[in-house]
Image (cartoon, rainbow, N blue to C red):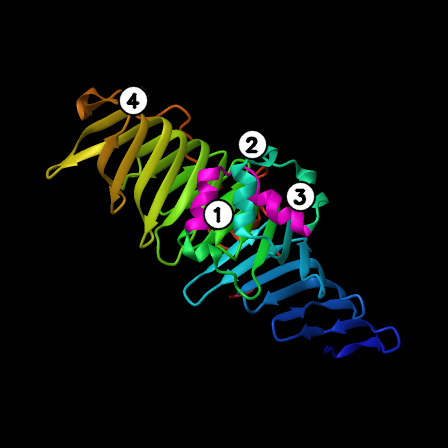
Amino acid sequence: LYAEYGWYDSMKNLAHLTKKPRIWNINQKVKADSIFYDKEKGDGLALGHARIEDIENHIIVQGNRVVYNDLSKIATATDSAVLIQYSKTDSLFLHAQILRTMPDTSKVSVRASVLSKGSKLAASKTPARDTLAAVTPEAKALTVKALNTDSIAANALVKDSTATVKPKDARLVLAYYKVRFYRQDMQGKCDSLAYWSKDSTIQLYTAPVIWSNRNQITADYIEMINRTKDPDEVRMKENAFIIAMEEDSVRFNQIKGKNMVGFIRNNELYKIDVSGNGQSNYYAYDKKGIIGLNQAQSSNITIYMNKGKVSRIALIKSPDGELKPMAQIEEGDKRLPGFNWQQEIRPKSKTDIFRTEEKDQKTLPNKISKK
């Protein structure tokens, strides 16, 4: 403990620190305008510019009110809450009305067995708002992971060698309500989000949108998996839709289907598997330039990309398609049903994550870490 002003009751092990207070150990640092701390129970309350840093997992949680417990290792931030995941190359800034971090005590194999049995959790859609708040931390680790994920996805996690490696202090991060995040190469929004540091899995619930460069990804549910060796994956379930804006900013390549899996290598999307009701619109080129709009439909589609452009398309089942010359393209041909380019709500900076969409206003915190 450290503070330039405050009091400490040595009989009850209670402290109230009010001027430049600090609490730290080998794995964690806590600071705020004022800190209440019960050493016996491990309970802490940090008020005003509160900041908790998880040194091992490179995670910082900030907010004007942070409740934490040293024994359970659970911290909850509200009032301009921000999560920062920092690295040497870039940092992710994420805002939600409520941010909660806790130890990840779940096992990947247990998650898979729950899903593969076709339980009610696996069949559920978006979780009710009070569901996650009411269950225990151990149940959350299974419940959130199980929701909206199929057995194929779960089995893939088990087979992945990096998914079974358990860091010394793996964390589960839950973000509730009006989530917005920003990183230089990726931005996004959804209503709630879960992140497992153990297997680097991020799950987005309720009207999720992800932007990267000129690309936009939407679905009812999105899961991102980051591996160290294998290609990264973006899994989109129900009403999956990918839009890629052309360099002229007036044409859009589009892919839609019931479910999709996008494969990423060297930070570029290079293959997309579409499963169910596949449709695609993309502009075709030859050496002289654009030649027309290629419209294709198939139950299942595999699309290969090269430097952001479609290089090859495989129509797997019940194929149908045509290449329309530019002169024959009508206005209704340019957009697939459900097209919705949402550039106006895209976070544009680490401070723009606080923007209130309904009123298109910005509510900014007093301070954001430079990390």
Q: CA distance from mark 4 to mark 2?
A: 35 Å
Question: Tag 1, which secondary structure?
Answer: loop
Q: Residues within 10 Å of mark 4 (few under 14, many from 20)?
A: few
Q: Residues within 10 Å of mark 3 (few under 14, many from 20)?
A: some
Going by the numbered disc 1, the residue's amino acid type is Pro
- Closest to the camera, between mark 3 and mark 1, is 3
Going by the numbered disc 4, the residue's amino acid type is Asp
Residue 105: x and y, percent?
A: 61, 56
Does residue 177 appear left or right of residue 20 in this picture? Answer: left
Residue 153 located within the stretch drawn in magenta? yes
Does residue 305 appear left or right of residue 149 in this picture? Answer: left
Q: Which residues are magenta?
A: 137-159
Q: CA distance from mark 3 to mark 1?
A: 26 Å
In the image shown, does 97 or 13 lie closer to the viewer? Answer: 13
Q: Which residue is mark 2?
A: 123
Q: Quadrant of residue 115?
A: top right
Q: CA distance from mark 1 to mark 4?
A: 30 Å
Question: Disc 3 or 2, which lies upstream in sequence?
Answer: 2
Question: Tag 2, which secondary structure?
Answer: helix
Mark carried by residue 219: none
Vertically, is 328 above or below 7?
above
In the image shown, does 195 or 356 lie closer to the viewer? Answer: 195
State if disc 2 and disc 4 touch (CB < 8 Å): no
Question: Tag 3, which secondary structure?
Answer: helix
Question: Disc 4 or 3, which lies upstream in sequence?
Answer: 3
Q: Which residue is mark 1?
A: 347
